[in-house]
Amino acid sequence: QVQLVESGGGLVQAGGSLRISCAASGGLFENYAMAWFRQVPGKEREFVAAIGTSAGITKYGDSAKDRFTVSRDNSKNTVFLQMDNLKPEDTAIYYCAARNYTGIYIYYRPKEYVHWGQGTQVTVSS
């Protein structure tokens, strides 16, 4: 059973940058496809970015394209989300998710992920 713990959230001004992390334990991290989702109260969980087990295979949601970068460090069992040029509408709780899958397809629906972290709050002030 994989456990996921997000960190690095906080308050940042519009136009600023933030990097959030997700540390995994309890499983063979290199066999897990990883993803980031975000959610605001009253709305559905939104896909942000995902990275496969093979280096370079990534997928981004429309809101993240050209501003966010997902990466992973298998030696540290950690996945990162670098967020640049942040906007107030990026304010949300950001969740890390994992799926035991080593193929090349990138899953992007919340129901397709089995393991979830507790989330980290990101607030962007205008």
Image (cartoon, rainbow, N blue to C red):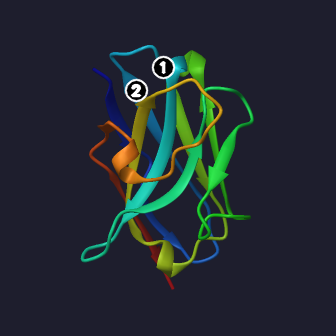
Whichever of callouts 1 and 2 sits on the residue coming sooner in the sequence is 2
User: Hey, which quadrant is residue 3 in on the image?
Assistant: top left
Which residue is the site of mark 2?
24
- Left or right of 116? Residue 75 is right
- Residue 58 coordinates in the image, percent (x, y): 67, 44
Query: Residue at 27% of width from left, 45% of height from top?
Result: 118
**Residue drawn at (36%, 63%) of the image:** 45
Res 40 quadrant in image = bottom left
Say if mark 1 contacts mark 2, CB within 8 Å: yes
Helix, strand or loop for disc 1: helix
Left or right position of 40 against 47: left
- Residue closer to the observer: 3 or 110: 110
Q: Residue at x 42, y 35 (%)?
A: 98
Image check: 116 left or right of 94? left
Picture mark count: 2
Q: Nearer the viewer, mark 1 or mark 2?
A: 1
Q: Camera-side residue: 20 or 68?
A: 68
Outermost residue on the bottom side: it is: 126
Residue identified by numbered label 1: 29
Q: Which mark is residue 6?
A: none
> Badge 2: how crowded within 10 Å, few (<14), some, or many (20+)?
many
The disc labelled 2 sits on which kind of residue?
A: Ala
Q: Between marks 1 and 2, how big is the CA–CA gap?
A: 7 Å
Q: Tell me which residue sits at (45%, 13%) in the image.
A: 28
Work out whether residue 83 or residue 12 is closer to the camera in this orientation and state it. 83
- Secondary structure, mark 2, is strand
Across and down, in percent, residue 90 comes to 49, 72
Amino acid tagged 1 = Phe
